[in-house]
Amino acid sequence: MSDFETVAATENQAARRGPSGEPGAPNQIGAAHKPRSLAGDAWRDLRRSPIFWISLALVVIFTLMAVIPGVFTTNDPSDCLLSRQHAGPSGGAIFGYDFQGCDTYSRAVYGTRASLLVGALSALGTGVIALVVGMLAGYFGRWIDAVLSRVIDVVLGIPLLLAAIVLLKRVGSASPTVRITAVIFVLAILGWTTAARVVRSSVITAKEQDYVAAARMLGAGHGRIMWRHILPNSLAPAIVVLTIALGSFIAAEATLSFLGIGLKAPTISWGQDIDTGRIHMRESATPLIVPSTFLALTVLAFIMLGDAIRDAFDPKLR
Amino acid sequence: MFRYILRRLLQMVLAFFGTTLIVYALMFAGQGDPIQALAGERPVTAAQRAYLTEKYHLDATGVGGFFYRYFDYVKSLLQGDLGQSLTGRQIGDILQAAWPVTVKLALIALAVAIIFGVTAGVIAGIRRASIFDNSTLVLTLLVLGIPTIVLAPLAQYFLGVKWQLFPPTAGSEPTFYALLLPGIVLGSLSLATALRLTRTSVAENMRADYVRTARSKGLVKRRIVSVHVLRNSLIPVVTFLGVELGNLMSGAIITEGVFNIPGVGFNLFRGIRTEDGPLVVGIVSVLVVVYLVSNLVVDVLYAVLDPRIRYE
């Protein structure tokens, strides 16, 4: 079975290399003794990309910050004293204090957790919906594809921010867990369409491959073919799309919190802090600049990471 | 062609009913006692209750009653009657005052995207893998990655408050100069996308057979680019910019809120802040319609511009 897969992958790779592989290009397939897999080839490209390493480092740092914020700052983000309002840096608070007299830096560090949690779980939810819908539509085709594709069209036609505003206005509860769940839920049910289209098209390509025909001849059922043969071969493009989506979900959560309908206090979130900082920017700008930088760097890290991986896996446009 | 437009139209009608149904169901249905909600903390007399029940058909219960009231809402939406905000103003009047400002802002943003995005995209596409190309790619990635809620307040702070190059807020009767900075901020995202799209499209067409033919005929590069390549590569860009105009009109909530521009997005921003439910629903309903119609127009335009598109 794995022989079929290797052959198919190599052929695929050769076909992809064809138009852009100029003579003398550094990564020619013929140079290696053993045919490299597409993933191995992509990894070789990725290793040399500075953008990949920078964004990967940022992602690792922010993930650590979300899991163990105590390592990055010793100050308690909820230790606020109005007498310290907009005070300068002192005692571990390297960026000074904000309007409420809280440590600006410490709040930004502790805000990472909510942002990454919402981003990761929304991307996960999106991934599950997209895989199920894309797999069903792509594998079975016919009327199932027709119906699901129309559903994708309709959901894609709904503007994300506007729909999220309407949906979240209905959530009256102020409990932090309920609000986080609501934001994740809303982002996932509005954001799955692009990934579903990607999965659908890669499933359509994968199901025509010889190894699927072979598996079918050996008597494998639909479930087994989808799970064991098609899923692993159509996962890579979906993961790239989801990495980029993770970044944009973090931005969307911050935007909703900024508007006052996403996460609310006592949850610490960058969106809210940016809003407060913006209102008081004339008195002190650091409470605006610090969470803004954290948010921008996180979103950028995920988008650049996804972009770098996509470029490595899809050498057509080089 | 006719079948394509018809199919696209049907799809839009479906999307329209789908979204308005969601908006309606979420905002109005199942809220407990709507009459008491309307009256707030004040008591409601039996006569008032009877009048309102009659007026809004609240006596019909169950699924039938829900759809009856939903179609009532759609009917008044299509007739342009959006009801009143909680402050008692007609939402139609609020929108009428706000539209010109929003359209002006959207046009400035679009102009920024076309002038800088498309021009730079064409240059980057012709000189692929040059320093200019690589640096614009990184720059656009940065712009695409920075959310508006970061870009808008920071631009306002640095360019408006600190270095005082632009007025930091626009106020009630915004001049062109006051709208310039918000327009650039709003347009930067479309600029980046337009640039990347133009670049890809030009780069792809530069490798096409007809360009090789033109070159072998001895045409100068200038003519090949301006006549042959541009005409073919601007099709996706034109359609993107069309979609973007619709997006810009509905997507200016943050920018208008931050820069205090009294447009549609600003009113939505304020409606969310002041918990003005009817205002939010009214504006969102109108914006959804604008979005759907602009998408439809662009799709049809796309089919007209590019005969290679299959209509089926």
Image: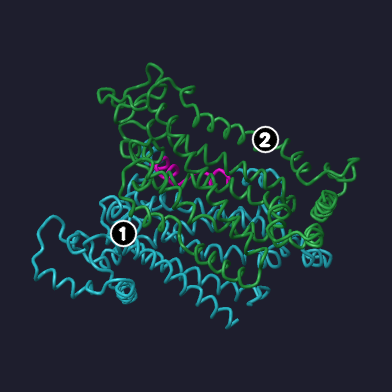
Chain colours: A green, B cyan
Q: What stretch is highlighted in magenta?
A: B139-156
Which amino acid type corresponds to the residue marked 2 in the rendered image? Pro
In percent of the image, x 39 and y 61: which residue is there?
A: B104
Image position, residue B46 (x, y; %) = 9, 68
Q: Is residue B152 magenta-colored?
A: yes
Which amino acid type corresponds to the residue marked 1 in the rendered image? Val
In percent of the image, x 67 and y 35: which residue is there?
A: A50
As rendered, which of B264 and A159 lies closer to the eye? A159
Q: Quadrant of the N terminus of chain B?
A: bottom right
In percent of the image, x 48 and y 56: which residue is there?
A: A190
Q: Residue B280: which disc?
A: 1
Under tag 2, what secondary structure? helix
Image position, residue A296 (x, y; %) = 49, 39
Image-quadrant location for residue A254: top left
Question: Badge 1, how many Cα within 10 Å: few under 14, some, many 20+?
Answer: many
The residue that mark 2 highlights is A50
Image-quadrant location for residue A267: top left
Question: Is A226 located above or below residue A183 in the figure?
Answer: below
